[in-house]
Image (cartoon, helix red, strand yellow):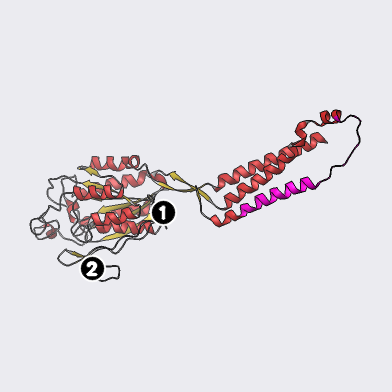
Amino acid sequence: MNVDQPYLLLGLLAVPVLLAAYVWQTRRRKPAAVRYSNVALVRTAVGPSRRWRRHIPVALVIASLGLLGVAAARPQVKADVPISSSTVILALDVSGSMCATDVDPNRLSAAQAAVRKFVETQGDDTKIGLVLFSGFAQLAVAPTTNKTDLLNTLDAVTTGRGTTIGAAILKSIDAIAELDPNVAPSSPEAAPNPDGSSIPKSPEGGDGSSTPTPTPSANGDKAPEIVVLLTDGANTRGITPQDAAVQAAARGVRVYPIGFGTKNPTQMVCSAAQLGGMNQQGFGGGARDFGGGVAPGGGRNFLVVDEDALKTVASTTGGEYFAATDADQLQSVLANLPKHVTTQQQDVDISAGFIALAALILLIGLGLSIRWSTLSG
């Protein structure tokens, strides 16, 4: 157990002072001397319990004051918190490859339907944020309990060129940092060159040779907030998912990646609304990131999930990787996600419990004092 305002514990010094004052006051009293011919008879009439029970109400009052002093310091304990009482950042891939029709009607439509159902089934106290990423990552909806805003934004997403999984992780970290003071913002992400390569930024803002060392979380514990990252391809530019995962792990942020789509993508067809500013010609062979399906120089197919990278992200951050090759599997993964998130912890204020206990003890003390005074009268 820890306390939020430890300096208020100094108020507990009043407890031993009051106890010492009571003992001193009791001892300085000079009992009146009365002559009785039979002292044993008097002792029998008074009874042994009456010699000490008059101290019980005072002891209970002092104990209640001590508990109130502890409550004032805002005691907190670590407690497991279910996903419905936490914050979830949904990072959704909206790259052009999400128009692949190997998942009916296409990957993006299936993902939108699955995410919609996930949002609708969460508790009213769940905060959900939405990060969208293609050639760059953006926080489309800050963490909120307003499901209407989330669903309206989800329905209006459009596709773009490129896939920046690493940048999406960093953007999710920053969204969490806005809510949780124990989570530091991400370090500057690698800046993409026109040719798709990247030059990491140094802490001073110049060009360097490596990504800056991330700032650890304030308490070293796992953050109660999590990131659910849904993608159908591989990182094409900017900071790598593995490097971004190191930053997330340093801040206690767990990432749960979901690899979506088959290993044999077919024709890409998106609706006019999903294409947004892109046109159908962009899906020919000239689109480097997804049109031909192969990276420059004959590299990996960006229409297929980079499972190795996503598994590394999960293991580095303490999350778990899930694979979904069709709409039903994706629905199942999202529906069962809360069962996999079992180690979330956060500080829970228990000062109300101390206040309630103090009030109960005080009432008992007053009740005993009244009862015994009536009997002695």
For image coordinates 22% across by 43% down, the residue present is 323
Q: State which quarter of the image contains the C terminus.
A: top right
For image coordinates 68% across by 52% down, the residue present is 17
Residue with the mark numbered 1: 219
Q: Using the numbered discs, state the Cα–Cα distance from disc 2 to disc 1 in whole angstroms.
A: 29 Å
Please indicate whether residue 314 sits to the left or right of residue 3 in the image. Answer: left
Please indicate whether residue 336 sits to the left or right of residue 107 in the image. Answer: right
The reply to whether residue 156 is visible in this rendering is no
Determine the image quadrant of residue 104.
top left
**In terms of sequence position, does the residue under pointer 2 or pointer 1 come before the other?**
2
Please indicate whether residue 342 sits to the left or right of residue 92 in the image. Answer: right
Instruction: Magenta stretch: give its range.
Output: 11-39
Residue 330, above or below 286: above
For image coordinates 15% across by 53% down, the residue present is 302
Residue placed most toward the observer, 239 or 29:
29
The reply to whether residue 280 is visible in this rendering is yes
Q: Residues within 10 Å of mark 2 (few under 14, many from 20)?
A: some
Identity of the amino acid at label 2?
Answer: Gly
Residue with the mark numbered 2: 208
Residue 10 appears at what percent x and percent y? 60, 55
Find numbered disc 1 in the image and state the secondary structure of the residue it sits on: loop
Determine the image quadrant of residue 64.
top right
